Image (cartoon, grey):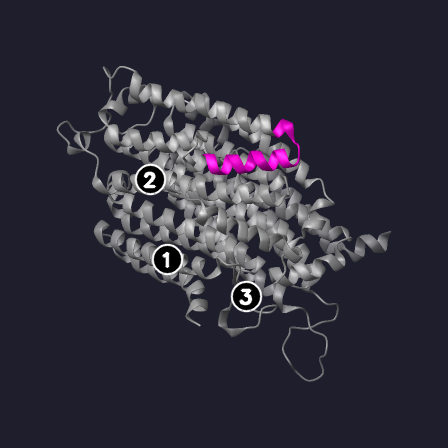
Amino acid sequence: MIHEQLSVLLVVIPLLAAPITAMFNKLSWSWLITLLVCASCCFFSAWLLMDVANGEIIHYELGGWAPPWGIEYRIDALNALVALIVCIIALCTTIYSRKSVEQEILPYQHGMFYAAFQLCFLGLLGITLTGDIFNVFVFLEISSLASYALIAMGKNRKALTSSFHYLVLGTLGATFFLIGVGLAYAATGTLNMDDLAAKLPLVENIQMVHTAFALIIVGLALKAAIYPLHLWLPNAYSYAPTVISIFLSATATKVAIYVLIRCLFNVFSLEYVLTTWLPQIMTVLGAVAILYGSVRAIGQTGMKKMLAYSSVAQIGYMIMGIGFLSQQGLTASIVHLFNHALMKGALFMAAGLYIYRVNTATFENLKGMGREMPYTFFAMLIAALSLIGVPGTVGFVSKWQLINAALEQQQWGMVVIILLGSLLAIVYVWKLVEVLYFQSAEKIRVQGVESGSERIGSSPLGMTSAMWILALACIYFGFNTELTLGTAGTAVDLLFSAGGTK
Amino acid sequence: MTDYILGHINYWIIIILMMVGLYTMMSKPNLIKKMAGLSVFQTGVILLYISFGKVTGGTAPIVAEGFDTYSNPLPQVLMLTAIVVGVATTALGFALIVRIQEAYGSIEEDELEKMDDET
C-alpha cells in the first residue's frame, strides 16, 4: 500500500515544495528546502528501486481511475533506476549548489532559481514514472520550460540566445512528439502505454501508425540531442549557470533516452521496430555522434563547452547500444546512462569549482590551476579517466558491455568506432590535463574577483564534497556492478519478455 | 477527388498551418516572428486533435434527452493542457526576447550571431 503511494510522492513533494520555495528569497532557506526535497525523493526512489529490482512492477492509479481511462504510474526496474539517478544527481547538485548559486545568480532570483530547479526535477521524475504517454508530454514540457528559464539565468548574455534557441527547438521536438501521440491515439483510442502496446499490433499496418512512430522518434531525438539534432546542446550547457549545467547534462538527455527506450520496446514492439530502418539508422547516427562529438570536443577552448561536446559523443554510445536491439546492447545503454550521469556530473562540478575560484573556464586562463587546486584536479581526473573507459572506473563497465554487444552481432566497424571514440577521449582529456597541470601557472587571469577575496584561496566544502561523492561513485560502481548491471539486466529482461506488456 | 479534398478540409488546413508555422520559424531572422511561427505550428496540432475527436452530428458530451451521438471529449481535454503549455512557452519566449533586446539591443538573429562572433 505505502509502496504505491511512494511513486506519486516523488512527483508531489517537489510540486508542493516549489511554490513554497519561490516565496523564500533568502538563499539559506530556499537551499534548505530544496535539499530536504531532494533528500526525501532520493530516499523514496531508492526504496522504490529495492521493491522492483527483482522484476516486480508497481502500478499506481492516480485518483483511483482504472488504467486505460485514468493516468497510471507504472514502475519497473528500468524507470526506478532512471528515477534514482535523477534523484542522486539532484541531491548532489543541491549540496554543491549553495556557494555556486550565491556567486552566479542575482540575489533577488535565489528563491525563483530553486523553485524552477525543483520544477525541472519533478518534470524529469514525472516523465520517468508515468505510464501514460500524454502525461509524458506534459511532464516533458514542465521540465523543459523550467530548464529554459534556468539556462537563461547564466551570467553571459549568450545564455539568453542559447536558451531561446533551445526553447524553439525543444518546443518543436515536444510538438512533434505530441503529433505522434495524437496519431497513435487516433489509431488505437488509448493513451496508456500498456494498452497501446496491446492495441498497436492490431493496426500496425496502417500508414498513420508509421507516421506516429516517425514523429515520436524524431521528437524524442531532438530532446535527447541525438546527432544531428544536437545543435541546441553545446551552447545551452556551456552558458547555463554551473549548477544547471551539472544537473541538465547528467539528467535531461538521459530521461529523453529513457522515453525513447520505453517507446521503442514497450509502446511499439520489438517486432515492429525490426521492420523499420530505425536500428541501422540509430547505430550509424550513434557512431557519427561518437566521432563528431569527440572531435569537436578536442577543438574547444573552454572546459564547459568541451564537456558539452563530449556529452554529444557519450549520447552516441547510448544510441548505438539501443540500435543493436540486442539484450546486451540495451543493457550497455542503460548502464552507460547511469554511469555517464555520474562522471559528467563530477566533471561539470570540477569545472564549476574552477569557475568559482577564477571566474572563468577557458583554457588560457586555467593554466596551472590543477596544481593550485590538487583535490579538484584529482577528482576531475578520476571522472575523466572514466570518460575514456579506463578499467576500474564506471566508463569501462559500460564500454566493455557495448563492445561485447557489437562483437556479438559481428559489427566490426562499430567496435573500431567505439575504440576510436575512446582514443579521441584520451586526446581531449589529455588536453585538459596538460592545461591544468603541466602548463606553467605564470599567468592566471582572475576576472571580476576582488583582491583579497576568500574565493581565490579555498574551495567551499559543500562543492568539493559533492564532487568527491560523484567521483568516488565513479570508482565504486566500476568495481561493484551489482546495482547497475543487475538492475539494467532485470529491466532489459522485462523489456524483451512478452513484447514488454504486463 | 473533390469529395476527398472537401471531406478532409480541416486536415488540409492543419497541414497548411503547420507548414506556414515551420517555414516562418526557419526563414525569419526576427525572434518575434519565430515565436509567431511556433504558435501557428502549435495551433495546427490543436486543430488536429480536435478534428480527431469530432463525430459528425455529435454534440457536447453531456447526457441529455434527445441526443445520442457525442463528440469524443478526451482530445478536447488534452488540448486544454496543450494550450496551457503553449501559452507558457510563448510567454517564456517573449520574456527571453525582452531580455535579449536589453542585453544586445537587437532581436534579429543574424545580428545577434554577428555580435556573438565578435566577442
Quick one: SS at disc 1? helix
Q: Which mark is residue A71?
A: 3
Mark 2 and mark 3 lie on one chain; the one further toward the N terminus is: 3
Looking at the image, the residue that sits furthest to the left is A452
Determine whether A179 is above or below A345 in the image. below
Instruction: Output the chain of dot 3.
Output: A
Residue A219 appears in which quarter of the rendering? top right
Residue A441 is situated, as x and y percent measured from the top left of the image, at: 24, 17
- The amino acid at mark 2 is Leu
Q: Which residue is mark 2?
A: A472
Q: Which mark is residue A41?
A: 1
The vertical placement of A213 against B28, above or below, is below
Q: Disc 2 to disc 3, how far (Cα)?
A: 39 Å
- Magenta segment range? A396-414
| Res B27 visible | no
- Residue type at mark 1 is Cys
Measure the alpha-carbon separation of dots 1 and 3. 21 Å
Magenta region includes residue A193: no
